[in-house]
Amino acid sequence: MLSVKLKKRLGNLTVEASFGRTGPGVTALFGPSGAGKTSLVNMLAGLLTPDQGRIELEGRVLFDS
């Protein structure tokens, strides 16, 4: 299970995401160009540090501000 609540300021854009209880299968992320999809994926991958929030995977905390 993946649980996410993140916030990151990137220039004039603030990326905010909150979702949880993703189970087995495919989870899709979609939105218009420039909405922050790649930034969100980069935060989940640990390539970009959120300004605040929490990422938890299978009960293991990966990020917690």
Image (cartoon, helix red, strand yellow):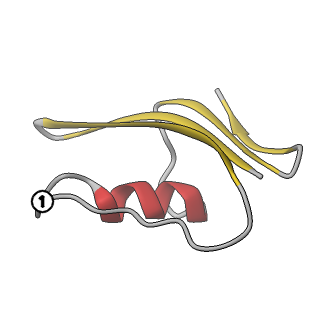
Q: Nearer the viewer, residue 30 or 47?
A: 30
Count neighbours of disc 1 (C-alpha within 10 A) and say few if under 14, some if 14 to 19, many if 20 or more: few
7 horizontally vs 49: left or right = left
Q: Amino acid at mark 1?
A: Pro
21 horizontally vs 5: left or right = right
Q: Residue at x 54, y 39 (%)?
A: 19
Q: Position of residue 6 (x, y in %)?
A: 49, 35
51 horizontally vs 15: left or right = right
Determine the secondary structure under disc 1: loop
7 horizontally vs 27: left or right = left
> In the rendered image of this protein, does residue 60 appear above or below residue 37?
above
> In the rendered image of this protein, does residue 41 appear above or below residue 11?
below
Q: Residue at x 11, y 64 (%)?
A: 33
Q: Position of residue 3 (x, y in %)?
A: 67, 42
Q: Quadrant of residue 30?
A: bottom left
Q: Position of residue 18 (x, y in %)?
A: 49, 35
Q: Residue at x 41, y 54 (%)?
A: 40
Q: Nearer the viewer, residue 5 or 22?
A: 22
Q: Position of residue 51 (x, y in %)?
A: 46, 32
> In the rendered image of this protein, does residue 36 appear above or below residue 50?
below
Q: Quadrant of residue 21?
A: top right
Q: Quadrant of residue 12?
A: top left
Toward the right, the furthest residue is: 59
Q: Residue at x 86, y 52 (%)?
A: 58
Q: Which residue was labeled with disc 1? A: 32
